[in-house]
Amino acid sequence: MNRDIEIFEFEWYLRDFFFRSTSHINDYKVSFKYNKSDIAENIKNKYLRYRDWELTKIEEFLMVTLVDMGTKGVVDFNIQAGKAELISLFERKQCSDCFYVNILSLIEPKSCVRCNSKKLLEFPIKRFPRKTDSV
Ligand SMILES: [Zn+2]
């Protein structure tokens, strides 16, 4: 597989990991700090896609991706210390043009990372509550 595509895909999983580990939190002021090696182990254990990967390869991809996300202002990544801190929480938005599920930091522009469309919808789309659900 083309390495650029692999990196693009890896970033999605990393964002998914950040999203899941913070999705129960409502307070944006809480700071989230991660060790690079902890993230690598989590990605290997939580995602089937990376189960067969060597930890060193995951760490190598993590390095590239965290530096890139640091450039985008999404994480504060200290390379020497191997520590990453989230600048804000993440949300999932599905593109209504190409159906790609974007995982975007709250401070990022709301456009699809695959096709650049601005037509993003909540994901998963919230169902209307049924009458029986109300008290
Ligand atoms: Zn799109």
Image (spheres, rainbow, N blue to C red):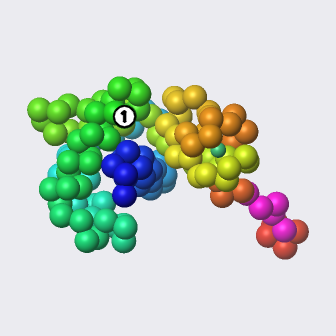
**Residue 88: percent from left, percent from top:** 44, 34
List x then y, in percent, for residue 63.
23, 42
**Residue drawn at point x = 82 percent, y = 60 percent:** 128
Please state the extent of the stretch shown in magenta in the rendering. 126-130
Question: Which residue in the rendered view is the most extreme toward the front?
Answer: 2
Is 31 displayed left or right of 98 in the figure?
Answer: left
Residue 6 pos. (x, y %) = 37, 52
The residue lying at 28 percent from left, 33 percent from top is 67
In this view, 132 is above or below 122: below
Amino acid marked by disc 1: Met
Front residue (pair 132, 101) = 101
> What residue lies at 26% left-to-right and 47% top-to-bottom?
62
Residue 53 position by quadrant: bottom left
Occupied quadrant, residue 120: top right
Decide: is 21 above or below 105: below
Q: Circle 1 is placed at which residue position?
A: 69
Residue 57 vs residue 69: left or right? Answer: left
Closer-to-camera residue (106/129)? 106
The residue closer to the viewer here, 30 or 18, is 18
Q: Quadrant of the C terminus?
A: bottom right
- Residue extending farthest right: 131
The answer to whether residue 69 is visible is yes
Q: Residue 134 in the image: x percent, y percent?
A: 82, 66
Q: Is residue 37 magenta?
A: no
Can residue 45 be seen in the rendering of this structure? no
